[in-house]
RNA sequence: GGGCGGUUAGCUCAGCGGUAGAGCGUCUCGUUUACACCGAGAGGGUCGGGGGUUCGAUCCCCUCACCGCCCACCA
């Protein structure tokens, strides 16, 4: 006999092990089985499971289990990401906290060693947590972005893209993170609104030039008064950048400055003469209309500088301190200290014209949190524009479909405006770029050590070969950067190549995930069988970072989009709707919830709430509700057990004769259809609610209650049929619920087999999803049980309203029953008596005195409640009910009285309304008759 | 500035062209041998405002308001 409640803690680890040991997590090797493939969004290898992972992975597991049960070769491929910058940051912090020397002092090799140590220490945590979630991943195929196979894929992709001209080295402005001292991509920049100011500076004109500047205007905005100026005003939010100014731009059509174009200003502090240029970028309506140009430290200015032929002067070190390109007194000064110093000096020297306080957006590194500097460096770029075109097309033409569909707009928006992707990072933890540099060759064929020439190949042998082709007969040697200077001196005739120090953006390797994990570039059976994958389940926050890039790389290298469907799941928030964060302390730990309420409850909650394609506000109360749902199922099974509802070998649901059993059979068919459709879509919430409704509100509330009198009755045939049916329905419930609540269902699958009946062929996880014919839905049985349920509901409601004590068993007289109703009444009499707690049930010609009316379809029941009747209360009740019918009659009557409605509405709608009107009129008549009798009595 | 999403019962949300729904909470009743992590019943909404289309609008269109998010923007 089952315990009173399910004990998840005792069961979960045991079942998980049993599943894994059985090989159920591996895809079927049946060559005829259609593949169903999901690649996991790889969590950070050193991370731990948060509620967002729990949601995302629950949905993936629901899909995987569902399709596995449907007979597909289901593969859920797990793995982890090395998460370059994030992991490096964690380890650096740990080193600092432990009072260790920093990474730069430690050196690259030692530092990377430390990171691997940290990975070894904490790397298993996240995958073990996925196991606790019940994730049925094929662990035998687990991958890590830095393992050998994936690293080979990364090298191959880098080299091929380079060969195809889709990956190149370029000197341009990048988003520079001064804390990590690396370039980051546009996506890793977060705009934050901060308090700032526009500082208006007067730059003096060179050579004594002056001009007339308008200072007063009439109503039409025409200048009425001018003043003579020997300076031009520019405004900036970053005063320190003025040290790098190489020009001032005005709009070509700006009358105010027309005569100044071509003239110079003398840059204060620096004393450099810089030209005033005309450029469309300058907006006459903003500020003074003149804008200072710092090509080396501003993205717009860089473009202006290019067009106007202005030089770029870099004034910053990688730490964002002023470098030796600025006057000595500012060298080595931090950028923010320099800002203050320059403003102070401007004020002192009288060229600070105005300070305009403002709030504006400033770029910050999403990991470091520090202000990003545009910085001029050599980096590797991917030609994202070219790769984006087929990726756009694949979604436009439906090869890949987003669910919900509106996310496609987001995807399109980004890809249509895509910029070159900077993929090199000045970090140590990641895939080292397979590029080596040698000296450039001048016109005379002599090496120029000061100019780098890149060679790109997968191996050093290939590099040497390429270098030979380029440098001719000279001896060629690969050395480390550290040894480079010494090598030049000791081996002057030799060409020295050294490897690029940088690593690749983490997302570069993630972009290959759907095929690199299958073994590509090797031609493995997995690549052939499992690419492209079926559904990607992920959050909208990484559509750009990851989804779009996988689409680009997948199509480019595999010739086919990596997924047929992209399911975007919501973001989980706390119950007040706030984003969870450690600093706010509102983080919900899924593992704590699993400990407390069981994995199944957490999974069901997340599944049920996943319909919200935006925010999920998670509350513990909700999870408790679904824990209760599990208990309900547990106890229903327990009830079945207590009543000998054992599975019967060869039982055929088509053979049942009892209306009750025919009815529940039809309900099972309907539920199977709903759940199957929902998980195929997928529309997880719909599947969850169909299951919940059927199991609790249909099976427990009605079928089992209606089965009780049968199981306690004398009719042995009906009893046997109902027992077998109950066991069968329970089996179907376990199967349908298994993808969402795998543990409790598997446990019950096992326990119910202990009570006798045929042995189980397999664990539930490996059991096939059923198929049932529509013909199992019996309309007559459904109508009969529907009638019974309605009648019971009516009587219960009436009893409650009239305060009939639960122990009282009033008689029921049925008036006006036709042939059909009499038959139903005969067949369902026992159940009606039992569920409505009635005494005698008789057929009568008229309602006896002292009864209250009950609508029973065409017939009327007269419930003998004389002793409980409070005439006034009953009058009020009847009057209220009649009023309800009257408003219904009015509404429907009005509709049916409208010729336009009759002419234009669909016939079935008109018919439905006619029926509704007739029913309401009949019910009203019955109740009015009862009210009349009551009046006569009272 | 551009875009996306939202506004339905006290709360959290379904529904998305033909009688307004669920869960939780609230109130009343209940020791009917599965379950109090339960059962029975009840109350509770002019579906954000205003227009329009339609025989009919919570649902489609327009518009306004408010909330949230994404992208762009540091003169």
Image (tube, coloured by chain):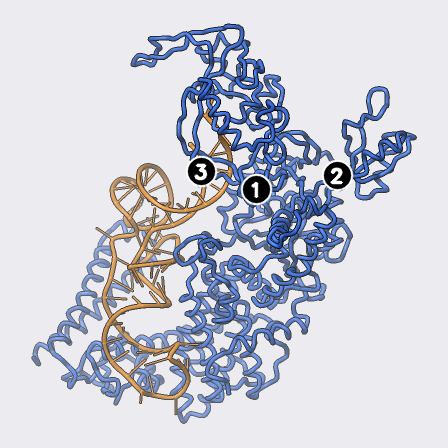
Chain colours: A blue, B orange
Which mark is drawn over residue A500?
2
Q: Are marks 3 and 1 in contact (CB under 8 Å)?
A: no
Q: Residue furthest right?
A: A473
Indicate the chain on which mark 1 is placed.
Answer: A
Q: What residue would you read off at disc 1?
A: A188
Which label sits on residue A193? 3
Q: Quadrant of residue A73?
A: bottom right
Element type at marker 3? strand
Q: CA distance from mark 2 to mark 3?
A: 37 Å
Marker disc for residue A374:
none
Q: Is residue A924 above or below residue A401?
A: below
Q: Is residue A732 above or below residue A607?
A: below
Between A294 and A804, the one lying in front of the other is: A294
Q: Earlier in the sequence, mark 2 or mark 1?
A: 1
Q: Are marks 2 and 3 in contact (CB under 8 Å)?
A: no
Q: Rate crowding at label 2 as few (under 14), some (14 to 19) or many (20 or more) other CA atoms within 10 Å.
A: some
Please tell me if label 2 and label 3 are on a single chain.
yes
**Label whose residue precedes the other's in the sequence (2 or 3):** 3
Q: Chain of mark 3?
A: A
Q: Position of residue A457 (x, y in %)?
A: 79, 40
Mark nearer the viewer, 2 or 1: 2
The residue lying at 52 percent from left, 37 percent from top is: A363
Q: Quadrant of residue A830?
A: bottom left
- What residue sits 68% from the left and 66% below the top? A26
Residue lying at the far bottom in this picture: please name it.
A714
Q: Is residue A681 visible?
A: no
């Amino acid at each position: 006999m089952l315990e009173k409640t399910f004990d998840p803690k005792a069961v979960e680890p045991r079942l998980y092990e049993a599943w894994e040991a059985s090989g159920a997590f591996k895809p079927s090797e049946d060559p005829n089985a259609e593949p169903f493939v999901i690649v996991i969004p790889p969590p950070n290898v050193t991370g731990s499971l948060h509620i967002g992972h729990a949601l995302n992975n629950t949905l993936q597991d629901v899909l995987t289990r569902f399709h596995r049960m449907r007979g597909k070769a289901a593969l859920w491929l797990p793995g982890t990401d090395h998460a370059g910058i994030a992991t490096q940051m964690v380890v650096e912090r740990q080193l600092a906290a432990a009072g260790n020397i920093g990474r730069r002092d430690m050196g690259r090799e030692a530092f990377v060693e430390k990171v691997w140590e940290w990975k070894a220490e904490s790397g298993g945590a996240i995958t073990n947590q996925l196991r606790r979630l019940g994730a049925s991943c094929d662990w035998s195929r687990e991958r890590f972005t830095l393992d050998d196979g994936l690293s080979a894929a990364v090298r191959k992709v880098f080299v091929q893209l380079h060969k195809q001209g889709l990956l190149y080295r370029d000197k341009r402005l990048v988003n520079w993170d001064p804390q990590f001292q690396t370039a980051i991509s546009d996506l890793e920049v977060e705009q934050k609104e901060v308090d700032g100011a526009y500082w208006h500076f007067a730059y003096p004109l060179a050579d004594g030039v002056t001009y007339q500047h308008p200072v007063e205007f009439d109503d039409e905005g025409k200048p009425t008064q001018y003043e003579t100026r020997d300076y031009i005003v520019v405004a900036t939010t970053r005063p320190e950048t003025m040290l790098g100014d190489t020009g001032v731009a005005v709009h070509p059509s700006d009358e105010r400055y027309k005569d100044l174009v071509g003239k110079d200003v003398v840059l204060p502090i620096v004393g450099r003469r810089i030209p005033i240029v005309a450029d469309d970028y300058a907006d006459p309506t903003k500020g003074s209309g003149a804008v200072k140009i710092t090509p080396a430290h501003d993205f717009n200015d860089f473009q202006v500088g290019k067009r106007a032929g202005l030089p770029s002067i870099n004034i910053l070190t990688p730490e964002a301190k002023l470098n030796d390109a600025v006057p000595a007194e500012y060298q080595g000064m931090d950028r923010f200290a320099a800002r203050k110093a320059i403003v102070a000096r401007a004020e002192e020297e009288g060229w600070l014209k105005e300070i305009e306080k403002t709030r504006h957006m400033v770029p910050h590194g999403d990991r470091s949190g520090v202000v990003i500097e545009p910085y001029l460096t050599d980096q590797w770029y991917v030609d994202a524009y070219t790769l984006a075109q087929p990726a756009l097309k694949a979604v436009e033409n439906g090869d890949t479909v987003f669910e919900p569909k509106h996310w496609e707009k987001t995807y399109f928006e980004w890809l249509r405006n895509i910029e070159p992707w900077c993929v090199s990072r000045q970090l140590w933890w990641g895939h080292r770029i397979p590029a080596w540099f040698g000296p450039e060759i001048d016109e005379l064929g002599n090496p120029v050590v000061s100019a780098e020439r890149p060679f790109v190949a997968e191996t050093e042998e290939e590099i040497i070969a390429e270098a030979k082709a380029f440098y001719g007969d000279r001896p060629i040697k690969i050395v480390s950067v550290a040894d480079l200077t010494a090598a030049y001196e000791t081996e002057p005739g030799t060409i020295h190549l050294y490897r690029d120090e940088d690593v690749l953006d983490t997302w570069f390797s993630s972009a290959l995930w759907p095929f690199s994990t299958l073994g590509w570039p090797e031609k493995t059976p997995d690549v052939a069988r499992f690419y492209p994958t079926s559904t990607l389940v992920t959050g909208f926050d990484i559509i750009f970072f990851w989804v779009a890039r996988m689409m680009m790389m997948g199509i480019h290298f595999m010739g086919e989009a990596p997924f047929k469907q992209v399911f975007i799941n919501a973001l989980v928030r706390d119950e007040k709707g706030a984003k969870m964060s450690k600093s706010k302390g509102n983080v919900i730990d899924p593992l704590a919830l699993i400990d407390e309420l069981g994995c199944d409850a957490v999974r069901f909650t997340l599944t049920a709430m996943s319909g919200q394609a935006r925010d999920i506000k998670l509350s513990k109360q909700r999870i408790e509700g679904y824990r209760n749902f599990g208990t309900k199922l547990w106890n229903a099974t327990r009830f079945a057990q207590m009543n000998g509802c054992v599975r019967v070998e060869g039982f055929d649901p088509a053979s049942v004769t009892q209306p009750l059993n025919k009815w529940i059979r039809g309900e099972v068919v309907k539920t199977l259809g709903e759940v199957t459709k929902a998980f195929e879509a997928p529309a997880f919430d719909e599947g969850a609610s169909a299951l919940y409704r059927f199991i609790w509100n249909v099976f427990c509330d009605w079928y089992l209650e209606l089965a009780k009198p049968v199981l306690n009755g004398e009719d042995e045939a009906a009893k046997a049929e109902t027992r077998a049916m109950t066991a069968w329905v329970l089996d179907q419930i376990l199967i349908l619920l298994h993808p969402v609540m795998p543990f409790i269902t598997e446990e019950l699958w096992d326990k119910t087999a202990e009570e006798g009946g045929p042995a189980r062929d397999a664990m539930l996880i490996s059991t096939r999803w059923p198929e049932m014919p529509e013909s199992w839905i019996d309309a007559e049985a459904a109508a009969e049980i529907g009638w019974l349920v309605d009648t019971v509901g009516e009587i219960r409601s009436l009893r409650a309203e009239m305060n009939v004590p639960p122990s009282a068993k009033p008689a029921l007289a049925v008036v006006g029953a036709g042939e059909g109703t009499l038959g139903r009444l005969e067949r369902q009499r026992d159940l009606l008596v039992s569920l409505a707690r009635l005494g005698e049930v008789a057929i009568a010609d008229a309602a006896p005195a002292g009864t209250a009316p009950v609508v029973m379809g065409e017939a009327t029941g007269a419930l003998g409640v004389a002793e409980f009747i409070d005439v006034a209360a009953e009058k009020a009740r009847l009057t209220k009910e009649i009023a309800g019918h009257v408003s219904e009659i009015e509404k429907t009557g009005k509709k049916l009285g409208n010729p336009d409605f009759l002419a234009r509405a669909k016939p079935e709608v008109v018919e439905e309304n006619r029926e509704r009107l007739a029913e309401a009129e009949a019910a009203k008549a019955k109740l009015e008759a009862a009210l009349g009798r009551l009046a006569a009595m009272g």
